[in-house]
Image: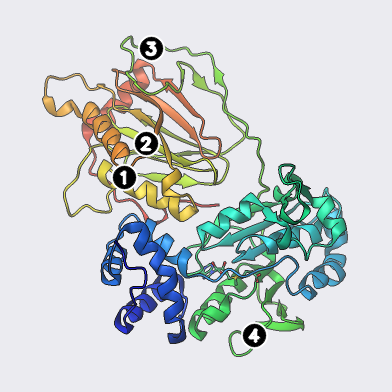
């Protein structure tokens, strides 16, 4: 039986303070010791641990990163409200949007706003309603809503709030942009769900301000970062504001919380309203219009098949999971980008695109999180590698973990991951047993998935054929094309040469 009243010793609290500072930049004051003890007791119970020392060592050894996420989720403070600090929304509707309106409605400019540290979503939805009320629907406008805390981000994305959470939404906006859930007839207990038309203006991402790279390639007209910097020390605030400045359009706005200031933090900004700052003229160059922060779209164009001129070999691939669409045909061109990967590479994204690769005896696992619409693929050559090759994605043992971590970094939840598996063909015809590698790869991948409780939804593995696969990052649809002898021979040649495993590059996961 776990003692829930177990107390957190000052020494243990110090370690917790260091860990949360290291992972999230949050500087926990000593006065929070009791609060931290209460919040972490839940984790001890969930993990069936009976001391904080055990918990700390579990956290320090947390290779998969799942406990790190739970730990951060426990220690963040997520208070927020609709139209909180309403003067910011009035600034948008009465000052900024009227200035931008001609260019926006004329189509020569698009509007990009980031709700950085959005918590459960009241802030980005308040921004979205303000934009909808001020601008024509035809304006190209998009909001990025991000938070480090995956639990609040899920609630943000779900966009469903009990009656007492929507009291600050003016009635006419509530009826225009929310649907009352029918299963709750009682007015006081009913739930209000944000309409899809409003939610579709928003993209939801897990972003930790402490990460060395943010999955963003656009510049924003406005960044809201309210009531977060109070949890950071001055140095962390300084670095964060400097980074925000580089993600703003020239003379873009940074809006912060009522008890925060940029005074003494960054002098590239000027105060133009109540806690509303603007980049001083000349600070950022104008950016190219090719930068992307595309709208969330539920519809995806899938690659269609075209007739093949090829001869398929006869041995069928084995599968005990449902078969993926097996096309002995070519892939037609697609409007969406196709990102090819080769052996030793990993690629994951929440952008709507295809990942493709050519497989002989190598195996590719495609992992995905339906709810977050995130997917990725690896491509490995052998199940296991030597102990000193921990960063090498050519070995299944690392490639699987690295793909999982990459997807989690993008916001996927490890517990929701599902898999599709491809390759592992006996394409190299030789009597040498070492070439039985395809089967070993498949066996390894299946065992790994089983051990990690990741359901295998579909597969096309084994056989004697090389294949070309495509996997869609958002729909998670997979297409398989069996290669003709000539192309297969090229794949076999590459595998025979067994190039030295390449290290996965730091930027192997391209985001946004
Ligand atoms: C008090 S809420 C603010 C919500 C909203 N901006 C508002 O003002 O109503 C602070 C949010 O900051 C997030 N946060 C804390 N540290 C963060 C970090 N390092 N990176 C990103 N978000 C972080 C927390 O998860 C929490 O949801």
Residue 508 shows in the view: no
Residue closer to the observer: 131 or 220 = 131
Location of residue 65 in the rendering, given as x and y in whole percent from the top left corner:
36, 57
Circle number at residue 365: 2
| Quadrant housing the N terminus | bottom left
Q: Earlier in the sequence, mark 1 or mark 3?
A: 3
Kindly identify which residue carries mark 4: 261
The answer to whether the residue labelled 1 contacts the one labelled 2, judged by CB atoms less than 8 Å apart, is yes
In the figure, 406 relative to 427: above or below? below
Tell me what residue is drawn at x 37 percent, y 22 percent: 487
Distance CA(mark 3)–CA(mark 4): 67 Å
Q: Quadrant of residue 90?
A: bottom right
Kindly identify which residue carries mark 1: 399
Circle number at residue 292: none
- Neighbours of disc 4 within 10 Å: few (<14), some (14-19), many (20+): some
- Mark 1: secondary structure: helix
Q: Earlier in the sequence, mark 2 or mark 3?
A: 3
- Neighbours of disc 3 within 10 Å: few (<14), some (14-19), many (20+): some
In front: mark 4 or mark 1?
4
Distance CA(mark 1)–CA(mark 3): 30 Å
The answer to whether the residue labelled 1 contacts the one labelled 3, judged by CB atoms less than 8 Å apart, is no
Q: Earlier in the sequence, mark 1 or mark 2?
A: 2
Kindly identify which residue carries mark 3: 312
- Mark 3: secondary structure: loop
Q: How is the image coloured?
A: rainbow
Distance CA(mark 4)–CA(mark 1): 44 Å
Q: Earlier in the sequence, mark 3 or mark 4?
A: 4
Tell me what residue is drawn at x 43 percent, y 86 percent: 30
Q: Earlier in the sequence, mark 4 or mark 1?
A: 4
Residue closer to the observer: 152 or 252 = 152
Residue 413 shows in the view: yes
Location of residue 144 in the rendering, given as x and y in whole percent from the top left corner:
64, 58
């Amino acid at each position: 039986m776990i003692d829930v009243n177990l107390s957190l010793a000052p020494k243990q609290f110090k370690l917790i303070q260091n860990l949360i500072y290291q992972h999230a930049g949050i500087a926990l004051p000593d006065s929070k010791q009791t609060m931290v003890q209460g919040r972490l007791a839940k984790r001890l119970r969930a993990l069936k641990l009976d001391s904080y020392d055990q918990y700390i060592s579990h956290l320090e050894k947390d290779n998969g990163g799942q406990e790190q996420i739970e730990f951060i989720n426990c220690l963040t403070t997520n208070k927020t409200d609709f139209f909180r600090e309403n003067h910011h929304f009035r600034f948008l509707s009465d000052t900024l949007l009227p200035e931008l309106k001609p260019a926006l409605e004329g189509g020569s400019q698009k509007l990009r706003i980031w709700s950085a540290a959005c918590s459960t979503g009241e802030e980005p939805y308040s921004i979205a309603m303000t934009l909808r009320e001020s601008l024509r629907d035809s304006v190209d406008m998009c909001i990025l809503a991000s938070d480090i805390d995956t639990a609040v981000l899920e609630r943000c994305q779900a966009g469903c709030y009990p009656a007492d959470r929507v009291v600050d939404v003016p009635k006419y906006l509530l009826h225009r942009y929310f649907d009352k859930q029918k299963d709750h007839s009682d007015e006081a207990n009913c739930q209000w769900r944000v309409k899809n038309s409003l939610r579709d203006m928003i993209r939801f991402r897990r972003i930790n301000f402490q990460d060395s790279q943010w999955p963003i390639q656009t510049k924003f007209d406005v960044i809201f970062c309210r009531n977060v910097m109070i949890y950071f020390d001055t140095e962390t605030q300084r670095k964060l504001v400097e980074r925000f400045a580089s993600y703003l359009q020239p003379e873009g706005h940074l809006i912060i919380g009522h008890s925060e200031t940029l005074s003494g933090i960054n002098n590239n900004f000027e105060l133009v309203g109540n806690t509303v700052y603007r980049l001083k003229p000349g600070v950022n160059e104008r950016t190219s219009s090719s930068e992307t922060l595309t709208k969330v779209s539920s519809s995806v164009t899938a690659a269609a098949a075209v007739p093949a001129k090829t001869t398929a070999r006869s041995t069928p691939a084995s599968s005990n999971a449902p078969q993926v669409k097996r096309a002995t045909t070519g892939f037609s061109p697609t409007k969406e980008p196709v990102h090819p990967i080769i052996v030793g590479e990993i690629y994951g994204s929440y952008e709507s695109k295809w990942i493709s690769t050519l497989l002989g005896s190598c195996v590719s696992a495609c992992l995905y999180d339906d709810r977050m619409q995130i997917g990725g693929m690896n491509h490995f050559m052998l199940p296991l590698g030597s102990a000193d090759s921990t960063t090498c994605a050519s070995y299944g043992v690392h490639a699987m973990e690295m793909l999982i971590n990459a997807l989690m970094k993008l916001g996927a939840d490890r517990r929701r991951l599902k898999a599709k598996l491809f390759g592992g063909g006996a394409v190299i015809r030789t009597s040498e047993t070492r070439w039985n590698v395809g089967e070993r790869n498949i066996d390894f991948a299946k065992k790994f998935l089983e051990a990690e409780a990741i359901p295998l939804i579909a597969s096309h593995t084994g056989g004697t054929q090389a294949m070309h696969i495509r996997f869609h990052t958002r729909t998670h649809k997979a297409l398989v094309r069996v290669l003709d002898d000539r192309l297969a021979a090229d794949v076999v040649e590459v595998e025979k040469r067994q190039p030295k495993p390449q290290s996965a590059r730091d930027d192997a996961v391209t985001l946004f």
